[in-house]
Image (cartoon, helix red, strand yellow):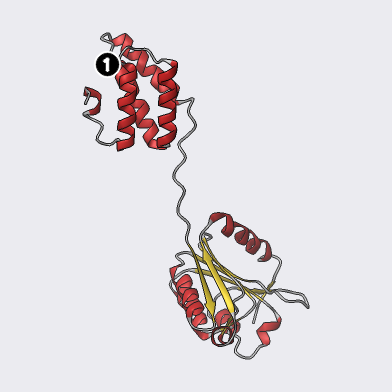
Amino acid sequence: MSQHLHGTSRLATATIDLLHHFERAFADSTLSVEEARQLRQRLAEHGQHGTDLHDLRHELFALARSRFNSFQDKAVVEWLEAASALLLPPAVPPARPTRAEVHFSPGTECVAAIQRFIGQAARQLDICVFTVADDRLTNALLSAHRRGVLVRLLTDNDKLLDRGSDVHQLFEAGIPVRTDRTDYHMHHKFAIADKRTILTGSYNWTRSAAEHNLENLLITDEHATVQPFVREFERLWPQMSVFTG
């Protein structure tokens, strides 16, 4: 192994292998067309990017500096390394893995998933549902409110009158509530946690949905899915009537 690889324990195995190939091409200080083709192919095979590519470039410039003895020559190579870095696109961080889960009713699966969703919110919960009439979910919202999570509720004005509706209870606990102003229904069923995770589906927040209905529920933190729901809630909130009890 050459002197340039002794300090490169941070490099991945594939990157070290590539560096060996560059060193062999550097033996006569000439990069032929065929050598360039082979190196380009190996780079493509290894899929070099991000910090790996940055480290490999640094090692190549170190290889070039080793051929010079004068301070001025080495300074020129260092300048070239710094200048060439400006011509590269910025490193793209690896995509954050997304989470998605799906649940179905009847049964307690959806209730438990919503309880976990509410319990995991750290700062904000925006709830936009047709109705809230399941004490288990009401209690989860009240617990979130008590621990300092900002909870906002959008719901249907007609469903406020239903037997078993818990909207008044949530309002009296200090949770801001707004309702639609029309003869039609605010029929959304979604919730947003910390503007990063969405819960949506056909599932109504009622006992009958858990015990009898065929319903579905999706929870995901995929950014492209979450953000349209965030925008929709922010659009609806100022349009809805402030509930005053």
Residue lying at 31% horizontally and 21% vertically, measured from the top left = 23
Q: Where residue 133 sits: x, y (%)?
A: 58, 84
Q: Where residue 111 sits: x, y (%)?
A: 50, 79
Work out which quarter of the rendered image holds the C terminus and state it. bottom right
Q: Is residue 143 in view?
A: yes
Residue 137 falls left or right of residue 35: right
Residue 180 falls left or right of residue 9: right
Work out which quarter of the rendered image holds the N terminus and state it. top left
Q: Where residue 78 sits: x, y (%)?
A: 35, 18
> Circle 1 is placed at which residue position?
66
Residue lying at 60% horizontally and 60% vertically, measured from the top left = 230
Q: Where residue 34 sits: x, y (%)?
A: 43, 19
Residue 22 falls left or right of residue 101: left
- Residue 93, above or below 136: above
**Which quadrant of the view contains residue 93?**
top left
- Residue 237, above or below 160: above
Nearest to the observer: residue 128 or residue 200 = 200
Residue furthest bottom in the image: 163
- Residue 212, above or below 47: below
Q: Secondary structure at mark 1?
A: loop
Nearest to the observer: residue 122 or residue 134 = 134
Q: Crowding at label 1, few (<14), some or many (≥20) Cα neighbours within 10 Å?
A: few
Residue lying at 55% horizontally and 75% vertically, measured from the top left = 175
Residue 137 falls left or right of residue 76: right
Q: Is residue 48 in view?
A: no
Count every numbered label the image shows and give the total.
1
Say what amino acid the circle numbered 1 marks: Ser
**Which quadrant of the view contains residue 13?**
top left
